[in-house]
Amino acid sequence: MIDTGKVKFNVRPFDRLNDIACVFATWCHYIRRSEPFNRMDPDEFRHHKRTVIERLVARHPPTMAVHEAHPNQILAWCCCDPKRNALHFLFAKEWVREKGVGKALLKFELPWFLRKKIYYTHRSKATPFLERRWDMCYNPYLVMKCDESQLSELSTLL
């Protein structure tokens, strides 16, 4: 159990069967309202964003913050890539925002996040707030799957 002083919650692994609908719905909802996605055709957006989210979730299953007494009540979740210091998305329900749940979840996933720069790959209306609060930098290219061998191959072509 994690206690932020304002909220107590448990952390559990992503359960694809039970959590994918919540992750997909919240991720799309908050991204859809931000630039440039708010100018896209809604059907095109859902189709392409679903593909991106499914690939990221398969590679980096989200960590779920759940109510201490009700493990099926999701309070927040985050999808991170610790190898790249990347935060793909962080969601917290409105009633737990500003209560330390997101910060505690990031510390759980990326323990060094207050000491090192974190790159985030998806912009939302909340990201300017996160950038001011923590050392974060936007890098959408970290969504792509590249390992060191692919990068060295690419550099020889350039």
Image (spheres, grey):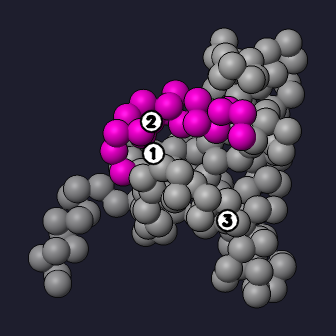
Percent coordinates x, y for residue 14 in the rendering = 67, 32
Percent coordinates x, y for residue 129 in the rendering = 61, 58
Residues at discs 1 and 3 in contact (Cβ within 8 Å)? no
74 or 127, which is in the foreground? 127
Label 2 or label 1, whichever lies nearer to me, is 2
Which secondary structure lies at badge 3?
A: loop
Tell me the crowding category of disc 1: few under 14, some 14 to 19, or many 20 or more residues within 10 angstroms, Cα based.
Answer: many
Identity of the residue drawn at 58% across and 44% down:
79
Residue 38, compared with residue 1, is above or below; it is: below
Q: Mark 1 points at which residue?
A: 81
Circle count: 3
Cα separation between marks 1 and 3 = 18 Å
For the N terminus, the quadrant is top right
Identity of the residue drawn at 25% across and 63% down:
150
Q: What stretch is highlighted in magenta?
A: 98-117
Kindly identify which numbered label has been placed on residue 110: 2
Tell me the crowding category of disc 2: few under 14, some 14 to 19, or many 20 or more residues within 10 angstroms, Cα based.
Answer: some
Residue 15, compared with residue 4, is above or below; it is: below
Percent coordinates x, y for residue 33 in the rendering = 78, 72
